[in-house]
C-alpha cells in the first residue's frame, strides 16, 4: 500500500494503486479501480467500482466518481508526445458513469481543469485543455472538443457537440442535440444545428434570484445586440450605456458582442492560438 494513504481511507483489496498515490482522509476506493502514478485524491472523495485515474492528476475533496469513468488519460491529440501535462479537478463534483476527461497538452496550457460543484453526466467527453468553471452541468453524451471554456453556471443538455476553442458563457443554456461552433453569449439559450441564440435564459436567472427588472433589461439588450442585424453593434452598445452602469450583466453581454468581433469563425479563443504551433 502507498505511503501516502491516510489511515481512515477505505480501499477495496482488488484496487490497483501506484505507490506514489496520495489518498486523503475518508477517501473510498471501490473494487477494481486503477489509480496511476502522481495522483492525489482529496478528503472524502469516493471512487465507485472500476474507476480509472491516471496522473499527473489532482482530485479535490468530496467528489463522487461513478463506474467506468476514466480521468486523466492521455489527450487525443496527434501532436502529444508524452509531455508533462496534468488534470486538476476541484471539490464536490459528481462525475457519472463512462465519463472521460483527458489531461492537457503542452501547447494548450498543459492542464485540463474542472471547477467545483459540477454535475457531469453519463458518457460525457471533456477533451484536452478544457477549462470548466464552477456549478456547470453537462448532460449525457455531450462532447467537448479541446481548449473549450465553459463558464460558471452554464448548462449543456444531452447529446451536444461543442467545437474546439469554443466558449460557453456564464449562466447560459445549450439545448439538447445542438451543434455549437460559435461562442455562446452569457445568460442566453442557444439551440439548433448550428446553434443560434434564441432568448434570454429566463428560467435559469429566476432560479438564481435575479430581479424581473434586470431580466427585462437583458431581454431588450439581447434583442438589439443579437437579434437585430440591421443595427450596427456599436450603436446598440451605446444605446445601453446607462443600463451597463446599472446592471453588470448588461455590460457583460455587451463585452461579449465586442469580443466576438475579434474572434475567428465566431470563437474568441481561436484568435488566441499560437501560430507557431497550429493545432488541428
Image (tube, rainbow, N blue to C red):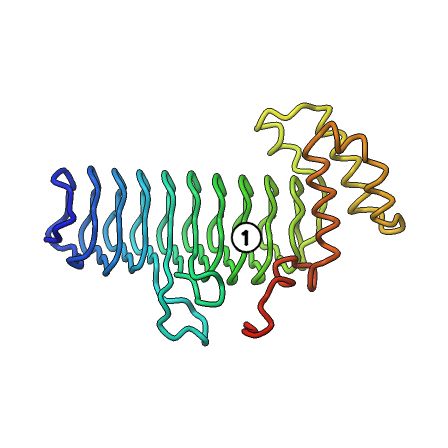
Q: In the image, residue 16 lies at what x, y percent?
A: 16, 58
106 sits left or right of 225 in the view: left
How many labels sit on residues? 1
Mark 1: few/some/many CA within 10 Å (<14, 14-19, 20+): many
275 sits left or right of 75 in the view: right
74 sits left or right of 211 in the view: left
Q: Is residue 110 above or below residue 30?
A: below
Q: Quadrant of the C terminus?
A: bottom right
177 and 186: which one is in front? Answer: 186
- Residue drawn at 44 percent across, 44 percent down: 115
**Residue 73: quadrant of the picture:** bottom left
Q: Is residue 36 above or below residue 190?
A: below
**Residue 45: quadrant of the picture:** top left
Q: In the image, residue 268 lies at what x, y percent?
A: 65, 57
Residue located beneath label 1 in the image:
149
Identity of the residue furthest to the right in this view: 230
63 and 246: which one is in front? Answer: 246
- Residue drawn at 32 percent across, 48 percent down: 59
- Residue drawn at 47 percent across, 55 percent down: 141
Q: Is residue 269 visible?
A: yes
- Residue drawn at 35 percent across, 72 percent down: 82
Q: In the image, residue 278 lies at what x, y percent?
A: 57, 74
Q: Disc 1 on helix, strand or loop?
A: strand
Q: In the image, residue 108 lies at what x, y percent?
A: 49, 63
Q: Is residue 280 visible?
A: no
193 and 92: which one is in front? Answer: 92
Amino acid at each position: 500500500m502507498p505511503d501516502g494513504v491516510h489511515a481512515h481511507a477505505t480501499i477495496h483489496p482488488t484496487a490497483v494503486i501506484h505507490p506514489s498515490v496520495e489518498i486523503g482522509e475518508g477517501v473510498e476506493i471501490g473494487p477494481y479501480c486503477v489509480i496511476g502514478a502522481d495522483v492525489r485524491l482529496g478528503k472524502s472523495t469516493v471512487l465507485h467500482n472500476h474507476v480509472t485515474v491516471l496522473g499527473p492528476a489532482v482530485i479535490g475533496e468530496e467528489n463522487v466518481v461513478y463506474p467506468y469513468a476514466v480521468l486523466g488519460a492521455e489527450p487525443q491529440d496527434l501532436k502529444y508526445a508524452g509531455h508533462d501535462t496534468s488534470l486538476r479537478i476541484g471539490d464536490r463534483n459528481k462525475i457519472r458513469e463512462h465519463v472521460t476527461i483527458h489531461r492537457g497538452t503542452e501547447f494548450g496550457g498543459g492542464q485540463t481543469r474542472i471547477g467545483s460543484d459540477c454535475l457531469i453526466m453519463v458518457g460525457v467527453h471533456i477533451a484536452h485543455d478544457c477549462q470548466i468553471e464552477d456549478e456547470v452541468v453537462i448532460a449525457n453524451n455531450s462532447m467537448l472538443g479541446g481548449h473549450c471554456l465553459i463558464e460558471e453556471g452554464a448548462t449543456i443538455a444531452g447529446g451536444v457537440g461543442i467545437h474546439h476553442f469554443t466558449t460557453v458563457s456564464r449562466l447560459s443554456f445549450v439545448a439538447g442535440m445542438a451543434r455549437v461552433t460559435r461562442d455562446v453569449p452569457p445568460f442566453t439559450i442557444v439551440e439548433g444545428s448550428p446553434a443560434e441564440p434564441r432568448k434570454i435564459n429566463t428560467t435559469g436567472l429566476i432560479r438564481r434570484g435575479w430581479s424581473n427588472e434586470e431580466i427585462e433589461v437583458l431581454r431588450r439588450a439581447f434583442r438589439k445586440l443579437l437579434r437585430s442585424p440591421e443595427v450596427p453593434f456599436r450603436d446598440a452598445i451605446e444605446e445601453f450605456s446607462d443600463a451597463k452602469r446599472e446592471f453588470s450583466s448588461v455590460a457583460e453581454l455587451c463585452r461579449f458582442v465586442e469580443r466576438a468581433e475579434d474572434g475567428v469563425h465566431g470563437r474568441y479563443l481561436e484568435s488566441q492560438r499560437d501560430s507557431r504551433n497550429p493545432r488541428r
